[in-house]
Amino acid sequence: MNLAVMQPYLFPYLGYFQLIYASDLFIVYDDVSYIKQGYINRNSILMDGAAQRFTLPVPGASSNKIICQLKFSEDVRKVIKTISQAYSRSPYYPVVFPMLREILESERRTISDVCLNSFESIFSYLDVDRKFIKSSEIEYDRSLSAQDRLINMCKMHDANGYINTIGGLDLYSKARFSEHRINLMFLKAKLNKYRQNATEFIPGLSIIDVLMNCSPDEVRSLLLDYDLV
């Protein structure tokens, strides 16, 4: 079984969803410090042929707080309006927009809950079964180093494979994981072109752009397009 762990992001880019797709169990890492000016509460969509940033405020956000202690603002009108204006003419707007709106308007407002709801909803829409849990709801040794915490989580869930994003290549040791009979792999996303309303293709936008422009079959094909090293 392959395990992956990542902080929750609001409608992240395709590579994040490839990481979920590549894993059997995905742990939403929500009991670590909130990162201000990061991608936890923001991303980019396509507006008039150019990348446009959207942000959902997090009242009281601070790097001194852990992610699961914080909530998204209840005022989602601006984000919803921006998404609608950007994609109202996109081919899959009629089915995707109501799903996104329901996620954004969810009564459960913690960052963890909104993001987890989005992951579950999107994979359900794609007819892909994946299992999710929150790190804040499991008992593991939080006193360990970052690397050993991941090893601890793998052992707790009988995972013999751990998949990290390629950004962790210099942070984690394959030899250290191997000592615990865990195969450490790094996912290198391929952000190939798909149908997009732009003069030149813009990679790395929010998953929203992919969902609005591609059929579920096409999205599943894009999710498979990565390398494990």
Image (cartoon, rainbow, N blue to C red):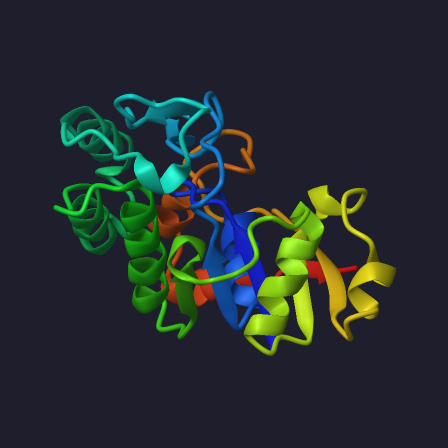
Q: In this view, does 85 lie above or below 26?
A: above
Position in image of residue 17 (x %, y %): 49, 55
Residue 77 figure quarter:
top left
Q: Residue at x 57, y 57 (%)?
A: 141
Quarter that holds the C terminus: bottom right
Q: Which residue is drawn at 24% across and 39% down?
A: 89
Q: Is residue 48 visible?
A: no
Residue 12 figure quarter:
top left
**Circle count:** 0
Q: Which residue is drawn at 38% across and 48% down?
A: 213
Q: Is residue 142 left or right of residue 168?
A: left
Q: Is residue 133 above or below residue 41?
A: below
Position in image of residue 5 (x %, y %): 55, 55
Position in image of residue 133 (x %, y %): 40, 63
Q: Is residue 196 above or below residue 50?
A: below
Position in image of residue 179 (x %, y %): 83, 69
Q: Looking at the image, which is closer to me, 142 or 175?
A: 142
Residue 159 figure quarter:
bottom right
Q: Can residue 73 be seen in this view?
A: yes
Q: Is residue 181 left or right of residue 153?
A: right
Q: Looking at the image, which is closer to me, 227 or 146?
A: 146
Quarter that holds the N terminus: bottom right
Q: In this view, does 58 lie to the left or right of 49?
A: left
Q: Looking at the image, which is closer to me, 117 or 33?
A: 33
Q: Is residue 105 above or below residue 174?
A: above
Q: Looking at the image, which is closer to me, 22 or 152?
A: 152
Q: Residue furthest right?
A: 175
